[in-house]
Image (cartoon, rainbow, N blue to C red):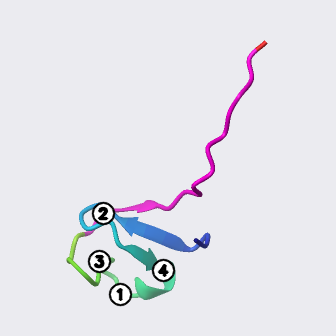
C-alpha cells in the first residue's frame, strides 16, 4: 500500500494516482468517478486516563 493509492468506491479496486492522468478521473475498471484514499490496516488504540 503506497501513499499515492486510491480506492474506487464502487468496485473497491486499488488504483495508483498515476493511472488517473485523464481529465475525467474515472475508474479504469468500472468507470465510476468517486474515490477515497487508502488507509493502512493498523488500528490505533488511544488510552484514556
- Residue 31: x, y in percent? 21, 77
Give me the residue at 22% from left, 70% from top: 32
Cα separation, mark 1 vs mark 4, equals 13 Å
When asked about the image quadrant of residue 11, the answer is: bottom left
Residue 14 colored magenta? no
Find the residue positioned furthest to the right. Answer: 49
Which of the marked residues, 3 or 1, is nearer the chain's N terminus? 1
| Front: mark 3 or 1 | 3
Q: Is residue 41 magenta?
A: yes
Residue 27: mark: 3
Q: Residue 9, percent across and down?
A: 30, 60
Q: Are marks 4 and 3 in contact (CB under 8 Å)?
A: no
Q: Secondary structure at mark 2?
A: loop
Residue ID for mark 4: 16
Label 3 and label 1: CA atoms lie apart by 10 Å
Quarter assignment of residue 47: top right
Query: Who's the residue at 61% across and 43% down the image?
Result: 43
Q: State which tag comes first along the sequence, 2 or 1.
A: 1
Q: Which mark is residue 34?
A: 2
Residue 22 numbered mark, or none: 1
Q: In the visual, does 45 lie left or right of 20?
A: right
Q: If you read the primary sequence from the N terminus, does the residue marked by circle 4 or circle 2 appear first?
A: 4
Tell me residue 7's x, y (percent): 40, 66
Amino acid at each position: 500500500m503506497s501513499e499515492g493509492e486510491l480506492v474506487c468506491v464502487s468496485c473497491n479496486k486499488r488504483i495508483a494516482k498515476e493511472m488517473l492522468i485523464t481529465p475525467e478521473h474515472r475508474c479504469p475498471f468500472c468507470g465510476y468517478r468517486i474515490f477515497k484514499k487508502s488507509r493502512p490496516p493498523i488500528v490505533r488504540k488511544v488510552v484514556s486516563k
